[in-house]
Image (spheres, helix red, strand yellow):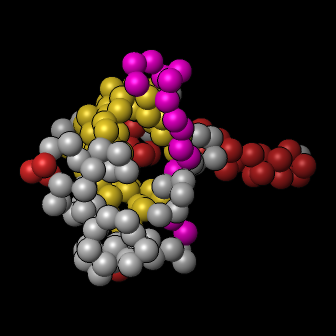
Amino acid sequence: MRRFLSSCLLLLPLFASAARADDADAVLGTWLTQDGKSQVQIERHDGVYEGRIVWLKEPKYTALDKEGVPGHPKVDLRNPDKALQARPIIGLPLIQGFKYAGDGVWSDGTIYDPRNGKTYSCKMTMMMDGRLKVRGYVGISLFGETEIWTRPTADAAPPAATKP
């Protein structure tokens, strides 16, 4: 009996992760991008999930940057809409239009890449270990790129610590 209870206690986190994976709001909160250079805050508005960049590891241009003015906040320089090229990267809408499809999947959304100014179709999948698989693609999911986002650790700079 004791061994059975011990086994159940060891498996409890696994079942808790599975339950979270089927929770529509499990995606809410702050996520650290795969490269560790930015954090994205995901929120739900009227049943639709969207996210903005809330933190950058390097929020200002440096003398080594090929674009931008050293010491000034990074902006959306590569946006094809010239009227949007001056908007700051911090606060930039990154993901939009996601709906929960069930089974830990959010679909029908888009993701914007400020590195090239392009918007891609996107789907997000909550992994069993609590990480978020973000897949941007053109046309069908086969032609795309996947990133794995994680929750920021306690030692990561909080979003409020960096302002443009």
Residue lying furthest top:
140
Q: Is residue 151 left or right of residue 101?
A: right
Q: Is residue 131 visible?
A: yes
* Magenta span: chief secondary structure: loop
Task: Specify the quadrant of the image occupied by residue 122.
Answer: top left
- Residue under the image location 68 percent in, 44 percent down: 14
Q: Where is 136 relative to 113, above or below?
A: above
Q: Quadrant of the C terminus?
A: bottom left
Q: Magenta segment: does it hold 141?
A: yes
Q: Where is 130 relative to 153, above or below?
A: above
Q: Which residues are magenta?
A: 138-153
Q: Magenta segment: does it hold 161?
A: no
Q: Position of residue 31 (x, y in %)?
A: 45, 56
Q: Position of residue 138 (x, y in %)?
A: 40, 24
144, 149: nearer the viewer: 144
Q: Position of residue 70 (x, y in %)?
A: 31, 78
Residue lying furthest front:
66
Q: Is residue 101 left or right of residue 131?
A: left
130, 35: nearer the viewer: 35
- Residue under the image location 54 percent in, 77 percent down: 155
- Residue under the image location 20 percent in, 42 percent down: 80
Q: Is residue 22 visible?
A: no
Number of numbered labels in the structure image:
0
Q: Position of residue 26 (x, y in %)?
A: 44, 45
Q: Where is 88 relative to 72, above or below?
A: above
- Residue under the image location 53 percent in, 44 percent down: 147
